[in-house]
Image: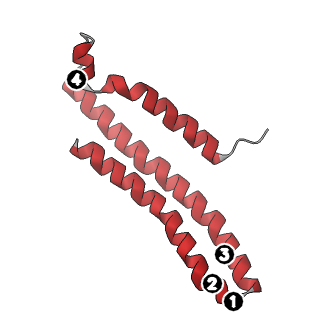
C-alpha cells in the first residue's frame, strides 16, 4: 500500500494538534500541573522549527511535481509556459505559510 506525503503530513499535524493543548501554561494551571516557563519556551521553538521544516519539505515536493508537469506541457505547447509559472508560485506559497505560522507562534 502506498502512503502519500499528504497523508503522512496530515497524520503528523493531527498528532501535534491533539497534544498541543497541554503545552500552554494557562491550560496546565487549570489542570494543577506545574510547567516551568523554560519548558514552554523550548516547546514553542520546537513547534516553530517543525512548522517551517514540514512546510518547506511540502513546498519542495509540490514544486518538484508541478515543475515537471509544467515543463512537459510547455514542451507540447510553448504558449502555456507563462501560465504554468503561476502554479509553481502557488506551490512555493506553502513555505511562506509555514514561516507565517512560525512568526505567529513566536509572537503569541
Q: Which residue is mark 3?
A: 70
Q: Are marks 2 and 1 in contact (CB under 8 Å)?
A: yes
Q: Which residue is mark 4?
A: 26
**Which residue is outermost to the right?**
1
Residue 29: image quadrant is top left
Give the residue drawn at x 32%, y 26%. 23
Q: Is residue 32 visible?
A: yes
Q: Are marks 4 and 2 in contact (CB under 8 Å)?
A: no
Q: Are marks 1 and 3 in contact (CB under 8 Å)?
A: no
Badge number at residue 78:
1
What is the C-alpha distance between the residues marked 1 and 4? 57 Å
Residue 43 drawn above or below residue 78: above
Q: Which residue is mark 2?
A: 81
By what rule are the colours in the image chosen? secondary structure
Badge number at residue 94:
none
- Mark 2: give few (<14), some (14-19) or many (20+) Cα within 10 Å: some
Q: Are marks 2 and 3 in contact (CB under 8 Å)?
A: yes
Disc 1 is placed on an element classified as helix
What is the C-alpha distance between the residues marked 2 and 3? 7 Å
- Left or right relative to 48: residue 79: right
What is the C-alpha distance between the residues marked 1 and 3? 10 Å
**Residue 17 x/y as whole percent:** 44, 32
Disc 4 is placed on an element classified as helix
**Residue 22 x/y as whole percent:** 34, 22
Amino acid at each position: 500500500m502506498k502512503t502519500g506525503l499528504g497523508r503522512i503530513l496530515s497524520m503528523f499535524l493531527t498528532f501535534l494538534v491533539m497534544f498541543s493543548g497541554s503545552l500552554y501554561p494557562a491550560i496546565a494551571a487549570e489542570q494543577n500541573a506545574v510547567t516551568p516557563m523554560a519548558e514552554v519556551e523550548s516547546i514553542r521553538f520546537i513547534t516553530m522549527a517543525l512548522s517551517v521544516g514540514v512546510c518547506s519539505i511540502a513546498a519542495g515536493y509540490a514544486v518538484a511535481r508541478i515543475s515537471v508537469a509544467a515543463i512537459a506541457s510547455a514542451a507540447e505547447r510553448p504558449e502555456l509556459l507563462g501560465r504554468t509559472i503561476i502554479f509553481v508560485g502557488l506551490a512555493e506559497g506553502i513555505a511562506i505559510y509555514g514561516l507565517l505560522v512560525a512568526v505567529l507562534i513566536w509572537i503569541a
